[in-house]
Image (cartoon, rainbow, N blue to C red):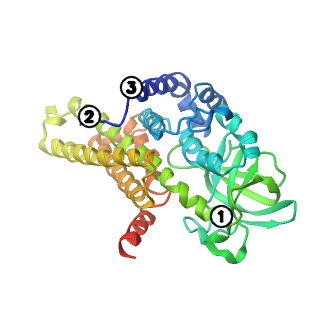
Amino acid sequence: MKRQIFTPDHEAFRATVRTFLDKEVIPHHERWEEEGIVSRDAWLAAGRQGLLGLAVPEEYGGGGNTDFRYSAVLTEEFIRAGASGLAIGLHNDIVGPYLTTLATEEQKRRWLPGFCTGETITAIAMTEPGAGSDLQGIRTVAEDRGDHWLLNGSKTFISNGILADLVVVVARTTPEGGAKGLSLLVVERGTPGFERGRNLDKIGQKAQDTAELFFDDVRVPKENLLGERDGAFVHLMTNLPQERLSIAVAAIAGAEHLLETTTRYVKEREAFGRPLAKLQHIRFEIAEMATECAVTRAFLDRCVTDHDRGELDAVHASMAKWWATELQKRVADRCLQLHGGYGYMTEYRVAKAFTDGRIQTIYGGTTEIMKEIIGRSLLS
């Protein structure tokens, strides 16, 4: 089915993104995977190409375009290229909205220009070793010391953790407030007491730096409070639908690309004297995956359209996230199986997609959390 959500301008942007990937990312990605980190030059190149801060107002150096379809195009093309290292989606679609909607005028002028040029790489630090998805379990504490906050605690599994120059930290500012006693503090590179631990060794997304972060008596200026004091819970809930939609967009793009790759493979690969595609079982497998992808794509495109209209709620974003990421996981497994022994070889795209995509059902809220959100909305 022909997709109907994109205009010629979106497709022209798609061509720009593909050119950027061909020139600035794909030739270097294997080296980045070996090194476990992306070159900062790639971030600067993305900034020069206008791929950072798409929704940031022009007065701060951004694109000034809040049409989420451009972000969807960017995500789709990065996924199809297998470029999992350069976490532009995290920067633009997850951290970006916190800065554009919550920051004061002074904060915007201080942080957003570098955000758009690639000189300031960002991360958000929510997850802790003992907390996971449970906001009430957060133990990182920020004490009000008059002219500053004194921050103590640790975070883990933080994407962009090594490269980040600006980290939005979720910390407890009212001990007895539970999930509603949390605030967002922005910690900048070089602040005394702010240390980075290991660049974590993951099974996939090898080029994307993921780190532990430690805060030992970090003095955070009062002017680095982002949004309202004790308002982090509301701020997080407001921005999570876009984060989950972004993950879902990546998931369906990944599933579709694997299906295309595997369809070509079974046409060319022979077994028992004929192409695999001539076997009924293979045809049934391809038919099932194609149908599942087509149905999911229709729902995801509707979610993108609703989000642009300001109509996507947390429940439907959760539906999109759990369904699309679980589909991606199933498709990756089945496509690897159809490749046989070659599917287990890292030189084949399907093997890399299998390991790179496995995190999708976990970060941004696990499948189980998504189902809980949906179930509560229906049964409360």
Q: Is 24 placed above or below 338 here?
A: above
| Relative depth, front residue between 39 and 108 | 108
Q: Considering only order in the chain, which callout, 2 or 1, is on the residue closer to the N terminus?
A: 2
Quarter holding residue 208? top right
**379 displayed left or right of 239:** left
Label 2 near label 3: C-beta < 8 Å? no
- Numbered-mark total: 3
Amino acid at circle 3? Pro
Q: Which mark is residue 2?
A: 2
Q: Which residue is mark 3?
A: 8
Eye-nearest disc, 3 or 2: 3
Q: Position of residue 39 (x, y in %)?
A: 64, 32
Q: Rounded to the nearest whole Å, what is the CA distance between mark 1 and mark 2? A: 43 Å
Q: Secondary structure at mark 2?
A: loop
Tell me if residue 128 can be seen.
no
Which residue is pictured at 60% across the width and 40% down the height? 36
